[in-house]
Image (cartoon, grey):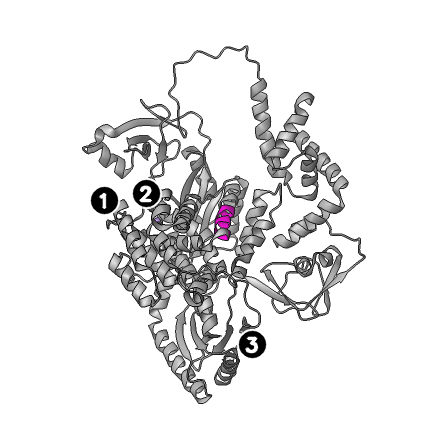
Amino acid sequence: MVNNDKSTVKSYEDLERAVEESGRPYDMEKIRRAYELAAKAHAGQTRLSGESYVSHPIATACLVVDLGLDTDSVVSALLHDSVEDTDVTTDDLKSAFGAEVAQLVDGVTKLGKIKFSSVEEQQAENLRKMLLAMSKDVRVMLIKLCDRLHNMRTGDGWPEQKRRDKALETMEVYAPIAHRLGMSNIKEELEDRSLKYLDPIGYSEITAHLDQNGGAQEFISDIADKIREHLEENGMGKCTIKKRIKSVYGIYRKMFIQNRAFEEIYDVYAVRIILDTVGECYNALGVIHDMYHPIPSRFKDYISTPKPNMYQSLHTTVIGHEGIPFEVQIRTWDMDRTAEYGVAAHWKYKVGVNSKDTDNFDSRIAWVRRLLESQREGQDAGDLLRDIKSELLPEEVFAFTPKGDVINLPAGATAIDFAYAIHSAVGNRMIGAKVNSRIVPIDHKVVTGEIIEIITGPKDKGPSRDWLNIVTTSEARNKIRNWFKKERKEENIAEGKAALEKEMRRNLVNIPDDQYDAFMLDLARRQRLNTTEELYAAIGYGGVQLSRLMIKIKDEYTKLLKEQAPAEVPPPVTIKKQKSSDGVVVEGIDNCLVKFAKCCNPLPGDDIVGFITRGFGVSIHKRTCGNAQAGLAGPDAERWVNAHWADSVKENFKSTLELFAVDRDGLMADVAGLIAELHLPCYAIAARKLSDGRANMTLTIGVNNTEHLNTIIGRLKKIKSITTITRL
Ligand code: MN
């Protein structure tokens, strides 16, 4: 649960204390110099919450110390915002603190500039950049995670829209990365704090449940005492027992995504037993199963089969004497550190503060490199995003080959994915599969614990193109494509060319013959391919998605037509119009930098005014916005200027709607269906059942203007059982 007593305002003394408590030999002289530079550079700057800015880098540095990172990381945390926000340059840092600090700060600054986008293609490219930075030096990402964590701890003062944007970005990008790096503490806090901003009602409903169960604390303490007693009797008196309550977001997922009642969640309360050796862990498991009745399907042995992020533990759910189920996690100290600190455990427990030795921790971020390497030329951005997301996805399944080898796959993977995970030769020759000796369809979804036998055919059989739509892992998809790429080059070219020509005819794209070759070559180059033939082949084997390519073709074709439009027609005489920027015309100012105020999120069609900011262009407010009204009446009134919307606004504006409805089956599907039918970009959607039988939904969609928004609201209102719709 988000702990609000954690003091978020830190002074340099707090950092000194944190360093001292860590008991590690940090270079305090270097750290003090970094602090002094940061304090000087940020002098006079304050945070939105009012305290002086430097408390933020100090707090970030404290978190970095807590992770056990080295002196250079602490120094870089102190200076992480200095290059971006002050006069300090990378060269200054290099001469004062060395090349490594300069590189770390540069890395963190660059990570911060990668703007999370809801546009799929951009999002994929940005994630790729993040992974690249991380694969070079994972400390960059660790410092960035500490930075984000402190920002989320202090986000209550942000305007509503910024809170939602940051929370969404944290939920979609940073928390999954923290998870993949095995840092469960940071991941859980990031998720809980994001949830608090994204679904405040759902969040408070769960915390209320947890508060009501005050008795549960007692219940779990009682159990911990009893377990300790029994372990002592069995010669394991040296154990440490921790009591644990599931994270709010963990509960939220089970309640709202898996649709279970709070009482139906078995692992809200857990007892964690930490022992010295693996042998003791299994012995302790025996003791627990002796004391309590285990729920058979809920035992998991992540010691013999670690999760991909290296997590190891024994999990079992048992029924307490009062009939209340609870989870017991058993592991060694080593496993516990890995579980809580992930990659950072490497610094915290294994190497000195100044060492750069990265021997056995490389495997922890090997997946990052694997993913980057698996990228092929001409790959579609949407595919990359899917690959990254499936690699970051938290849920995994484990299945066995008949020989007993463990294959681990993301949840939802099929028998074909399983076959390709064994070896591409097995996948390419696959003709069927058996699970626990019974034949299953090849799109069978793998379930943990199954023994899967892949039936293979003749050597030259080869996969089917349809499989590309069935498989869920990037590994299988890549291997299938590679087969087609290699084995069927001619066929791919012919098929790709035919498909492209057909699609162009269907879209009435008719490129003049004398320009055809140049047009196609240009298109190929844009896909990072060298020749038109390669482009045809890529379409043929599925490396380039035709539907996406058509969007680009149509764009280019329109440009081409414009260029060739006859120039004889003289331009009509018009009064000189002021140029618009971002679809807004600010009276008296041409081409100015325009941004939309987060307090009122104006949409085309709204009556608007502009405010001339100091150095950041003109910020556009709704005329009815409280801030604008106050401003127009205030001492700065002359800085408010008239503005209006340009005639054609093509941009997409985010708008958030809140819906109430009488809950019924299929409600969510109807809403989602309408969004799809209207081709609206959907940035966020959340739905909850309220205790009074109603349903509450918030959705953030992209709209063109108020008129467009009103049409959408009108359509939404026609959906059965929806009662009210408000624009947030
Ligand atoms: Mn920062």
How many angstroms separate mark 2 from mark 3 (CA)?
60 Å
Q: Is residue 311 above or below residue 623?
A: below
**Is residue 132 part of the magenta span, yes or no?**
yes
Range of the magenta residues?
Answer: 127-135
Amino acid on which disc 2 is placed: Val
- Residue 296: image tag: 3
Callout 1 secondary element:
loop
Which is more foreground, mark 1 or mark 3? 1
Q: Which residue is mark 1?
A: 44
- Residue 88: image tag: 2
**Residue 18 point in image, percent of width and height:** 30, 63
Earlier sequence position, callout 1 versus callout 3: 1
How many angstroms separate mark 1 from mark 2 (CA)?
15 Å
Which of 399/710 is in front? 399
How many angstroms separate mark 1 from mark 3 (CA)?
61 Å
Earlier sequence position, callout 1 versus callout 2: 1
Main SS of the magenta part reads helix
Amino acid on which disc 3 is placed: Pro
Which of 628/187 is in front? 187
Callout 2 secondary element:
loop
Please identify the residue farthest to the left as the structure is shown. Answer: 635
Label 1 crowding class (10 Å Cα cut-off): few <14, some 14-19, many 20+? few
**Is residue 669 part of the magenta span, yes or no?**
no
Q: Is residue 127 above or below residue 533?
A: below
Amino acid on which disc 1 is placed: Gly
